Amino acid sequence: MAFTPYWWEAAPRLERAEPLPAAADVVIVGSGFTGLVAALTLARNGRMPLVLERGAPGFGASTRNGGQVGSGNQKFRVKTLIALRGREKAHAMLREGVAMLDHIAALVEDEGIDCDFTRCGRLRGAMRPEHYEAMARDMDDLRALAGVESHMVPRAEQHREIGSDLFHGGSLLPGDAALHPSRYHAGLMARVEAAGGRIEGDAGVGAIAAEGTGFAVSTARGTVRAGAVLVATNGYTDGLVPELGRRIVPVGSALIATGTIPEARFASLMPGGRVYGNTLRVFSYFRAAPGARRIVWGGRVGRGMEAASPGAYGHLAGDLLKTFPDLGDIPVTHGWDGRIGYTYDAVPHLGRTRDGLFYALGYCGTGISRASWFGRRIALRMLERPEGRSAFDDLPFPAYPLPSVARRMVPVVEGWYRLKDRLGR
Ligand SMILES: Cc1cc2nc3c(=O)[nH]c(=O)nc-3n(C[C@H](O)[C@H](O)[C@H](O)COP(=O)(O)OP(=O)(O)OC[C@H]3O[C@@H](n4cnc5c(N)ncnc54)[C@H](O)[C@@H]3O)c2cc1C
């Protein structure tokens, strides 16, 4: 079993370790989708961005995720959003969420990125009958407020979508999509470099200090002077910028890939050819790997085990078997994990710190479309272009009351949610 992302086999991490320049127009910390889409936007508008990455480029969540692409609204319950933000603001956020999905589709198309992007649709299976009813109401609200097309698939008809009896029907969002994360990332890297931007791996930023009208960005490989800095570290945010470190809690998330499934059995598992998930708080999500008869299955990380050991992924294989009991003889070939960035208010944020650093982060686990969108918005804002405005601009960005305690509490909170899932609360 390999303990690196299945996706890396089709698009391995590329080393980039040229001597760092003394100066750049903009330094971007973090080489995921946020950093690269921002870099591409800046480079295409005449600014020379330098992306600095602690690991190899694409080390973080952007090449480790499930490749399920939704709108920016996946984590929102429409009624809750209205209650918290008011109808007008909720409306603006939901509309922008829909635009995020259209944006990534257009970006892949316009840039000609070969990453198996397909509008395959998403089926979310109800784990309890009451979940089905709640999803139906939420889908009605989403349609009324943001014009999102959706259908409910009753339990009696779910076999046309999925060869499993685990669910009590589900909701179908036909416009949702799938892509190959690592190939999307590789495509973005190529476009950034072709546009004149630079990306450097093995260049962890240790400090950012104000200097004159700009910043001095220090790495173990030297210091770069920058006119502006964008922090795009999402789930890998640490104490580099304490103001952001207090606002992001990293949460581990893990995936497995199965070996090849015999054709006759594979055809009946996911006949709808969607991306799939369920309605639990600590949820599972899965899909077929593009161009292969394998399943890529995601969920929580295994606790108390070495990440590079089969035991750390046994619970994911167990969840897969509960859904598809016929796959007991199929091996798990890959297991890996990554970090998602959670905010206290469960909303992503972009803006500027008190010290003038730009940031875009906090995607709370659904970040492929959100990070791509926020990368572009924040770059347009750095360019002082009016299109950089976002419905998320003026949201207060709350700090966690006790950030270090919150970080340590992640397993406890997750355990509590799993208990609630089991009890059906
Ligand atoms: C296992 C997993 C599954 C997921 N599945 C999905 C999914 O199916 N659909 C979906 O929409 N979203 C999914 N997500 C979320 C999505 O992948 C992320 O929201 C998105 O990739 C975030 O992109 P990013 O560029 O902001 O951050 P990242 O891609 O995480 O990049 C941040 C980078 O910053 C670097 N960094 C941190 N500190 C420094 C420093 N001091 N100096 C230099 N570099 C630094 C890190 O090394 C990292 O590479 C998943 C995430 C995980 C972990």
Image: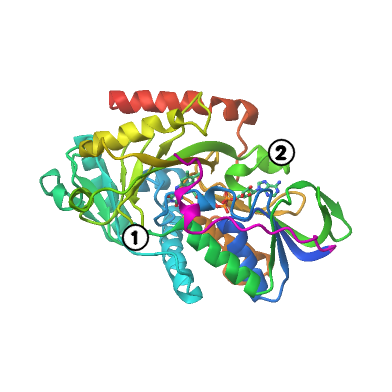
Per the image, label 1 sits on a secondary structure element best described as: loop
On the rendered image, what quadrant is the C terminus found in? top left
Between 419 and 191, the one nearer to me in the picture: 191
- Residue 34 screen position, x and y as percent: 58, 57
Q: Is residue 179 visible?
A: yes
Q: Quadrant of residue 334?
A: top left
Q: Quadrant of residue 166?
A: top left
Cα separation, mark 1 vs mark 2, equals 41 Å
- Residue 294 screen position, x and y as percent: 32, 50
Q: Is residue 27 above or below residue 165?
A: below
Q: Which residue is mark 2?
A: 239
- Residue 56 screen position, x and y as percent: 64, 52
Between 170 and 1, the one nearer to me in the picture: 1
Magenta stretch, main secondary structure, is loop
Residue at the image point whose x is 18% and y is 46% from the top = 163
Left or right, 310 with reference to 260: right
Q: Is residue 330 above or below residue 413?
A: below
Magenta-colored stretch includes residue 14 = yes
